[in-house]
């Protein structure tokens, strides 16, 4: 395998594995929010805001993987040593 | 409620047309046009070219996108360690954002009336919402204290994010002295320096709040070794059993405070990369959509970007607010 193939493969793997955890996390968050909404439908606004913030926190992990993948694909300096 | 609806539908039965709009024919033609554009753009894009072998006319083809991670230097001012520095296009966008925010606030301040106009009440409601947001998370007194800087951060990030969706960003080109063609405007959050600067501002703010409200007690959180030395003292004084106990818990306290110290700096990295990655990822998504299906489907990532810009701005402000309110509350249960 040459460097180019390796680079693209690494970007794909980093994005795929990196979004596994956040996917599970966001699923659990959504489940929690739905449970809370079912128990207490009046608190819709507060639940929605807090759920959004928590989802964005979980999503940040996937964003780190995205940054790594972007750097692997688009930054030519990193591998042209 | 549920029984009234069909009655209302029956009353205006003929007027309700396509999608509940009275101009049924217009809406219908519009949807058809959008669909046709959708299919045409899908077929003429690179995907359609690959599958169908259609060659689009020259004026319709989109050049292959290229992504530059560092911001482009528009006005070079010198070199440092082999890297050119100067005024980049993201700095110009930052200035544009600041000018817009200052103009909006000046207009609102100068023309504020007791009975607000439409614009003033919009701004007022935004500020009121943010004020309640601060008060809910940080309490009555601290919320009032933190409100200005949190609102500044939120509005700055929000306007930065939304400005870069306007036409002209990335498409207005300037020619530099070396003959390069560079975009004049670029979303400021897609350059890592802007999120880093914002994160450093919020870091300094959090530490200042902590030291101002806790004093030395706040700094003790990061170097909690008192119990460790106390344990040594107890051992030398002959109280071996409780001395070793203090020694053991002192080591745990020290490790915890070390972790606390590291996490304080990791917050900066996490805040920076969260904003940067989201904004850059969105920009690249828009670029790739534009390349793959060039006319209509671009609305989808554009709409997503509107939501993400708002959410990221709120996240940045909210995290700063939460960290600051944690730093402001004294640790009473700690120690002995």
Image (cartoon, coloured by chain):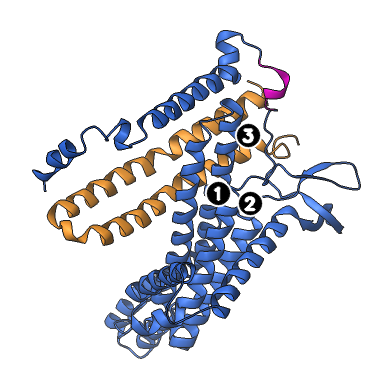
Chain colours: A orange, B blue
Residue found farthest to the left: B3
Same chain for labels 3 and 2? Say yes or no. no
Same chain for labels 1 and 2? Say yes or no. yes
- Residue B311, image quadrant: bottom left
Q: Is residue B223 in view from this perspective? A: no
Circle 3 marks a residue in which chain? A
Q: CA distance from mark 1 to mark 2?
A: 8 Å
Residue A78 in picture, x, y percent from top left: 70, 39
Closer-to-camera residue (B285/B238): B285
Q: Are marks 1 and 2 in contact (CB under 8 Å)?
A: yes
Residue A43 in picture, x, y percent from top left: 21, 61
Residue neighbourhood size for the residue with mark 1, other residues' Cα within 10 Å, grouped as few (<14), some (14–19), many (≥20): many
Pointer 2: what residue?
B187
State the SS at label 3: helix
Q: Residue at x 50, y 77 (%)?
A: B148
Pointer 3: what residue?
A73
Q: Nearer the viewer, mark 3 or mark 2?
A: 2
Pointer 1: what residue?
B279
Closer-to-camera residue (B134/B264): B134
Extent of the magenta region: B56-62
Residue B104 in picture, x, y percent from top left: 58, 69
Q: Residue at x 38, y 76 (%)?
A: B250
């Amino acid at each position: 395998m040459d460097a180019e193939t390796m680079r693209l493969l690494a970007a794909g793997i980093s994005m795929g594995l990196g979004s596994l955890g956040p996917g599970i996390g966001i699923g659990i968050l959504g489940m929690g929010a739905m449970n809370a909404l079912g128990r207490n439908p009046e608190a819709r606004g507060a639940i929605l805001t807090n759920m959004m913030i928590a989802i964005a926190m979980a999503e940040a992990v996937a964003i780190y993987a995205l940054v790594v993948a972007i750097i692997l694909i688009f930054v030519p300096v990193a591998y042209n040593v | 409620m549920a029984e009234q609806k069909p009655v209302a539908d029956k009353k205006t039965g003929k007027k309700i047309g396509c999608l509940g709009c009275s101009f049924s024919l217009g809406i219908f033609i519009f949807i058809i046009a959008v669909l046709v554009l959708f299919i045409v753009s899908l077929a003429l894009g690179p995907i359609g070219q690959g599958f169908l072998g259609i060659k689009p006319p020259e004026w319709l083809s989109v050049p292959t996108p290229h992504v530059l991670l560092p911001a482009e230097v528009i006005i070079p001012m010198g070199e440092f360690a082999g890297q050119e520095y100067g005024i980049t296009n993201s700095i110009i966008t930052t200035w544009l954002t600041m000018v817009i925010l200052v103009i909006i606030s000046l207009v609102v301040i100068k023309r504020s009336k007791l009975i607000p106009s439409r614009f003033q009440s919009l701004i007022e409601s935004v500020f009121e919402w943010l004020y309640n947001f601060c008060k809910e998370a940080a309490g009555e007194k601290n919320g009032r204290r933190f409100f200005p800087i949190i609102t500044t951060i939120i509005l700055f990030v929000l306007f930065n994010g939304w400005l870069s969706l306007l036409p002209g960003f990335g498409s207005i080109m300037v020619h530099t002295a070396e003959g390069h063609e560079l975009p004049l405007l670029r979303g400021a959050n897609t350059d890592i320096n802007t999120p880093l600067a914002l994160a450093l501002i919020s870091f300094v703010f959090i530490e200042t709040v902590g030291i101002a409200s806790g004093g030395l007690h706040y700094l003790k959180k990061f170097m909690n070794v008192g119990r460790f030395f106390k344990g040594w003292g107890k051992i030398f004084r002959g109280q071996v059993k409780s001395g070793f106990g203090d020694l053991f818990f002192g080591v745990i306290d020290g490790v915890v405070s070390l972790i606390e110290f590291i996490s304080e700096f990791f917050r900066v990295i996490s805040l920076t990369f969260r904003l940067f990655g989201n904004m850059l990822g969105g920009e690249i998504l828009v670029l790739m959509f534009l390349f793959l299906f060039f006319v209509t489907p671009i609305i989808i990532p554009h709409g997503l970007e509107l939501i993400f810009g708002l959410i990221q701005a709120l996240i940045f402000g909210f995290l700063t607010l939460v960290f600051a309110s944690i730093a402001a509350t004294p640790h009473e249960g700690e120690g002995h």
